[in-house]
Image: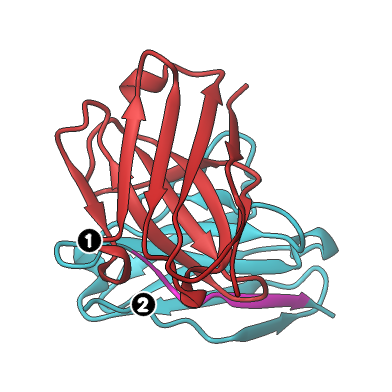
Amino acid sequence: SYELTQPPSVAVSPGQTATIPCSADRLDTHYVCWYQQRPGQSPVLVLYQDSKRPSGIPERFSGSNLGNTATLTISETQPMDEADYYCQAWDITTHVVFGGGTRLTVL
Amino acid sequence: EVHLVESGGGLVQPGGSLKLSCAASGFRFESYAMHWVRQVPGKGLEWVSGISWNRDSLGYVDSVKGRFTISRDNAQNSLYLQMESLTTDDTAFYYCVKDLRGDYGEPTTLDYWGHGTLVTVSS
């Protein structure tokens, strides 16, 4: 089965840039989405097709996908960005697959 | 505005059955693929099942194949998940989720999520 690997946690200072990686074999042959889930809330789509932002998502959120790693980058990180972030892709055998999630802490 | 409202969750004994429903509004339901995603409280997301706009294509995670059945009624703007032979491992919040596209397959983008309904499997 196809697995997406994320670090359990990432910490960043307010105003700095946070990077959250998502790794899998030949990941750049798949489109990757990213979801933000704040405590007690449903997930929200923040990036799709590697780097596209849905309406309402700030430009501070950007993404890339190269080789085996997709990356979510949050510039000028704010306290409101503190949340769990999940990457997601499609695989022919597993169909929809999520990474294990990364808790972003804004210190 | 897109609204997805799940219902049908609750407490059920191991081996029991439950049917989840999702009422959709604010978009042309018949044109989009739909999914169920679950989350054990405090844990990560797990995709459960998805279905194309016209029901021609669908899929399940391996752990629920043969036990869960996804369906939709485009006339009623509703998505369903029939769950049989439930085990304690099925305990989770179940989210109804809209796809950005009508087809089931790559790329799958889950652009709107409901608030979830809790299924608890326990004796």
CA gap, disc 1 and disc 2: 25 Å
Residue B10 falls within the magenta-colored stretch: no
**Which region is colored magenta?**
A97-105
Q: Is residue A25 left or right of residue A104?
A: left
Tell me which corner region of the image, top left, top right, bottom left or bottom right, holds residue A19. bottom right
Q: Residue B99: horizontal and vertical position, in percent?
A: 39, 38
Tell me which chain appears cyan. Answer: A
Q: Secondary structure at mark 1?
A: loop
Residue identified by numbered label 2: A4
- The majority secondary structure of the magenta stretch comes to strand
Q: Secondary structure at mark 2?
A: loop
Amino acid at circle 2 = Leu
Tell me which corner region of the image, top left, top right, bottom left or bottom right, holds residue A17. bottom right
Tell me which chain appears red. Answer: B
Few, some or many residues within 10 Å of mark 1 (<14, 14–19, 20+): few
Residue at point 76%, 59% (across, down): A40
Name the foreground residue: A41 vs B76: B76
Residue B112's place in the image compared with A75, above or below, is: above
Q: Is residue B84 visible?
A: yes
Residue identified by numbered label 1: B66
